[in-house]
Amino acid sequence: MEPLQQDDPRQIGPFTTLARHRDSAVCVRYLAHGPDGVTAVVSVARPELAALTAFRRRFRSETRRTQRLAGGWVAPIASSTDGADGTEGTEGTDVADGEPLWTASPYVPALTLREAIALAGPLPERAVRILGAALAETLSRVHATGAVLHGLAPDTVLLAADGPRLTALGALGAAAVAEAHPDGQLTVKLGYLTPEQATGAKPGPASDIFVLGLLLAYASTGTTPLADADRIAHGEPELGGVPDELRPLVARCLSKSPEDRPSAGTVAADLALEGAAALAREGWLPPGLVAAVEEQAAQVMALGRGDAWNPGSGPVPGPDAGPDAGQSEADLRRAGAEPVDAVASLHAGAAGAGPGSVRDADTLLVGSARNAPGDGGPGEGARVDRVTAALAVPAARSASTGTAPAVARPPVAPSTAAPFPTAPLPTPHLPAVPLPAARLPAALPPAAPAPDRRALLTGIAGAAAGLVVGGGLVYAIAAGDADKGPARAAPAPRRTRVAGLPPEPVWRYAHPATAAALLATVWQDRVLVLTGEESTGVDLRTGRRLWQRKEAASASRAVPVDDALCFVDTPDAFLWIAAQDGQVKHRIAKATSAGPGEVLTLTGRTGLDGTTLWMTGQVKKGAALQSYLLAYDLTARKWLWRTRIPGAPAPHAPQYQLIAVRPAEIVVRQYSSTLTPAQRKAANGASVLLAFDRKTGKQLKSLRLAGIHPAAALVGDESGRLFAPVADRLNAHTISGGALLWRLAPADTAPGESGVFVFGGAIVRSPMLYVANRHQQVSAVDTANGRLLWRRSTDAPVSDEIPGTGFSTSGRTVLAYDSGQLTAFAARDGKRLWKFQETGAQDSGTGAPRYEPLAGGGRNLVVRRDRTFYALPVD
């Protein structure tokens, strides 16, 4: 804080200024009293900028945006552009020529991020999480409309006792440099440049995420991870000082490609799933910063309690003031008095000595040295606020007379017309009441034109080293086009949120409707390969279609082969296709893949391990028709072996399901619909497993599992365990002999419910097994002993549909999916993370398409629902 200077206004609209608070490139901020007694921060635009039509229009636009976004981590504001009744101004609202442009918000004791780093160094990890989550929650509201914030910088982020605040919602508020030109143009340089802007591309919401990543790194380390524009465009960020738990998320925010950056909602959920406000409620700032905020609050409270003295003004009238109270400077001169110099008065009265000086707890009552005894009464003089005077800044003087202008401050009294449009934020007493985090999208005005950023941030008093980035690219706003912004993107679809914030899809791809079935495979975490009436490649970064090949029509899923190719089984040939562009690199006609005089017809895909593909098929030679289990090496492009298996009743062909892959053998089970009458009779209602040697294909053994239905969902692991639902329980057996190892009891039914809630198919990631049941619960089980580690509900309505289970690519997230929703749980402790639903899609129930997570996708989880695919940033 500083005392008011000679050219500073003493009255701004309904506010009476007390002291200077902070400066920026476009405005000066003052502490002031409102007519309702609220201490406010009033930001007044610099006159040379306010004279520009372009600036005034942009000022009005950003003010409207802030007023509509008020709440959560954004303070309510009043403005000079508001209507006469205090409501938000209309499009054409303007102020008279020569009148200042200003905004005002309730004062909250806080330090800027730059001040905090300079004072106490990097923030603790917990504080960084709360800071980032609060900013991301605000960005999420802005991005929901397709707008871009352009308001993040170390000087626009405040750290208050109850959480962060964002003070700039546009390019003007975050400007590092703003210049007015004679031709009416306004040049604005912002603090940070993003990679897309460095290459001349148009910034979008992902640009805000990049800048958020820079701020998170700066808050964590005290320095910027990218020291100049060239490194922003081409270099890798230095993140060694960022805490280990935060480093992956910050690195994703700083991805060069906008498509690879997480959404604001994802950042908020990753940093603080329960919300920034919940975490900040118990305190979040380190002790040094808490003390600094408290000290600032005490100073401002002293300004508010005492009769804050403006140099040259008379004493503020109190309830017992006489007829001379509140005299103007002219009145004082006529009485033979001179205005009092603040600094000289401070030195005279600080020791409690000097003629006419009286010291009390809050103020220094100082008389002029030239006052004759009795001129103003013993001990009378200007009342000087101790805090303001102690700043030791020379008194303001009038440009015309060399003396300070005299503006009597009106008494502070309650008013029925509050200057702020919504409930004010906490006034300066600590601790302040936490504000709830605002998560729901708010209607915002059209986005401001997108400026190019050059990082020009400098450290406070040289302490914030590493934040200097060169400038050069500017954003010029002409008077006639100040409000022209980029075309607004379509709002993101609204989704139901039950437990935590669901990730916003990075992209959504809807495949054209066709009559044939559509099958999907993820190749190398880079391309989604779809097969059906044709084969299609979709870029996993952008969701854009890369290629289509009619000749690669297939009724089977494509199989990844290596870092260039995928395998597609067409009716007439095996094809090896370059996944990036769809070009056919190798072709083997099926007519040449069998022996002399043979015709091979593949009847089903059994399973895949590495580059070995197991299939079932029929070979016709003359009149004879034999069924086989076959193994094929996709890399060497040759058959490894084929083994005779029993046939199936017409019109079926035998098909096998892969149950377990072990070092020396594979274990399969024949689909019950393709069993022969003899096989059914021998099984007698049980599942029959067959083991084959991996190298030779020789059948090793047959195992009948009594009590396990032929259609029960089975899965095995490398250790030789087999997991199967049996009636209302989940059993573990040995693959070698079928011996029972353990049983997992089902969930208890709720009062009034009846029936058996059987388990579905399990997924295994050793040493854990995850399985869902018909009661809409997901369980984590130790595969060795059957110990239940956690069980959580999806909170979906109970139905006959048993959810499927899956993993994210990293394995840290367990997914339960059905026709109604996709629910995510933390694999370690079962904490429910979020629920994803597509608004407007066919309702859940019989016949409705299921949500299905696909294996692979890297950081993004690829989710399918019928012919629509989503990329959700999960890892």
Image (cartoon, rainbow, N blue to C red):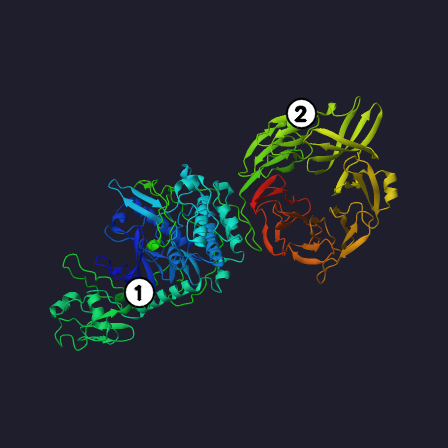
Q: Quadrant of residue 566?
A: top right
For the residues bearing labels 2 and 1, Cβ distance under 8 angstroms: no
CA distance for labels 2 and 1: 83 Å
Residue 746 pos. (x, y %): 74, 57
Where residue 454 appears, x then y in whole percent? 37, 43
Q: Residue lying at the far top in this picture: please name it.
A: 597
User: Tag 2's secondary structure?
Assistant: strand
Residue 328 visible somewhere in the drawing: yes
Q: State the residue in front, 712 or 363.
A: 363
**Where, quadrant-wise, is the N terminus in this rendering?**
bottom left
Q: Earlier in the sequence, mark 2 or mark 1?
A: 1
Which residue is painted at 44% across and 54% down in the image? 219
Amino acid residing under circle 2: Arg
Residue linked to disc 2: 587
Viewer-side label of 2, 1? 2
Q: Is residue 757 left or right of residue 496?
A: right
Give SS at disc 1. Answer: loop
Circle 1 sits on which residue?
35
Residue 560 quadrant:
top right
In the shown orientation, is residue 517 left or right of residue 178? Answer: right
Question: Which residue in the rendered view is the most extreme toward the front?
Answer: 240
Residue 415 in sight: no
Q: Which one is nearer the viewer's eye here, 578 or 546?
A: 578
Q: Residues within 10 Å of mark 1 (few under 14, many from 20)?
A: many
Amino acid type, mark 1? Pro
In this image, 247 relative to 755: left or right?
A: left
